[in-house]
Amino acid sequence: RQEVLRRIDQVNLKLSDQWASQGKTRLALRLLTRVESQTKDDQLRDRASRRVTELRSTL
């Protein structure tokens, strides 16, 4: 179960990168903040919050 949730979070991070590159920044941010608040994986949470910071600076 944990592994499945971790995979979902990883997919969400990839998806948010894709969206951000297509200019769907707000969509990407919504997804990233969800990962950030819900993931149990510290590494993924750190990546998500770094991305949030990066994307917010482009808005």
Image: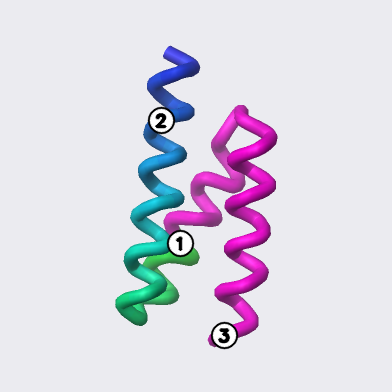
Which residue is under mark 1?
Answer: 30
Q: Are marks 1 and 3 in contact (CB under 8 Å)?
A: no
Position of 55 with respect to 9 (left or right) is right
Label 2 Cα neighbours within 10 Å, binned few <14 / some 14-19 / many ≥20: few
- Three-letter amino acid code at the position of disc 3: Thr
Label at residue 58: 3
Q: Position of residue 38 (x, y in %)?
A: 55, 37
Residue plotted at (34% across, 64% down): 18
Dot 1 crowding, Cα within 10 Å, few <14, some 14–19, many 20+:
few
The stretch drawn in magenta includes residue 44: yes
The residue under the point 68% across, 47% down is 46
- Which region shows up in magenta? 31-59
Select label 1 or label 2 by which is in front.
2
Q: CA distance from mark 3 to mark 2?
A: 27 Å
Q: Under tag 2, what secondary structure?
A: helix
Mark nearest the camera among 1 and 3 is 3
Could you tell me which residue is drawn at 55 percent across and 55 percent down?
33
Label 2 sits on residue: 7
Q: Is 8 part of what is drawn in magenta?
A: no
Q: Earlier in the sequence, mark 3 or mark 2?
A: 2
Q: Residue flagged by tag 1: what amino acid is it?
A: Arg
Which of the 4 image quarters holds residue 17? bottom left
Relative to 54, say whether 57 is above or below.
below
Q: How far across and down, in percent of the image, does residue 1 sit? A: 42, 13
Question: Mark 1 or mark 2: which comes first in sequence?
Answer: 2
